Amino acid sequence: MTVETEKKLDDIKALFYFAYKTFTEEPDHMLVKYGIQRMHHRILYFVARFPGISINELLTLLEISKQALNSPLRKLIEKGFITSVPSKQDLRVRQLTLTKEGKELEKKLSYVQSRVLKNIFNELGEDCLISWIKVMEKFAASRPGNDLWCSKKGIE
């Protein structure tokens, strides 16, 4: 690898950091009003996409331990954003869904992030969107959470 390529990779890493900060900044400010953090947002996001998701499936998507999920999930339940009920098929399995308030909050949080992405891709065009998706798919390919995401979405 050339020195020039190494420098470009350093630039890409910095840009990735700044892009992530831009992507999460506004939702993070919104979360403060509710006394919750980014982990809570992640939980809300996946529960919104898969109503009735089991706790074990959520653990796989987030790639965290039960211990790491326990406190933020409990807080979301206490704040009335998520409900946890036993599965009708197996009472040992807890299924999660968003409450009306949880759906409203998740929608607000996702809207600001979608707006950022839409603005960028509207400006850069369809070719950039397709390339971006390819890059993100390569990043995500080895993640267990991505495997579950794809299977639940019916993506091969």
Image (cartoon, rainbow, N blue to C red):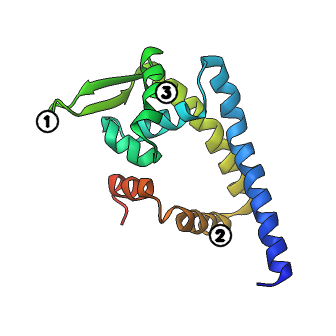
Label 3: which residue? 72
At label 2, which amino acid type do we have?
A: Asp
Judging depth in this view, the residue of 45 and 61 nearest the camera is 61
Task: Residue 119 in the image: state x and y as whole percent.
Answer: 71, 49
Give the Cα separation between the discs numbered 3 and 1: 26 Å
Tell me if label 2 and label 3 are in contact, CB under 8 Å.
no
Task: Residue 23 in the image: state x and y as whole percent.
Answer: 69, 44
Instruction: Name the residue rendered at 46%, 43% in the picture.
Output: 64
At label 1, which amino acid type do we have?
A: Gln
Q: Which mark is residue 115?
A: none
Label 2 vs label 1, nearer the camera: 1
Q: Give the mark nearest the N terminus, 2 or 3.
A: 3
Q: Is residue 77 visible?
A: yes
At label 3, which amino acid type do we have?
A: Pro
Q: Which mark is residue 89?
A: 1
Label 2: which residue? 127
Task: Residue 40 in the image: state x and y as whole percent.
Answer: 53, 30
Q: Quadrant of the C terminus?
A: bottom left
As drawn, the residue found furthest toward the front would be: 67
Q: SS for tag 1?
A: loop
Q: Is residue 35 left or right of residue 92?
A: right
Judging depth in this view, the residue of 48 and 66 nearest the camera is 66
Give the Cα separation between the discs numbered 2 and 1: 45 Å
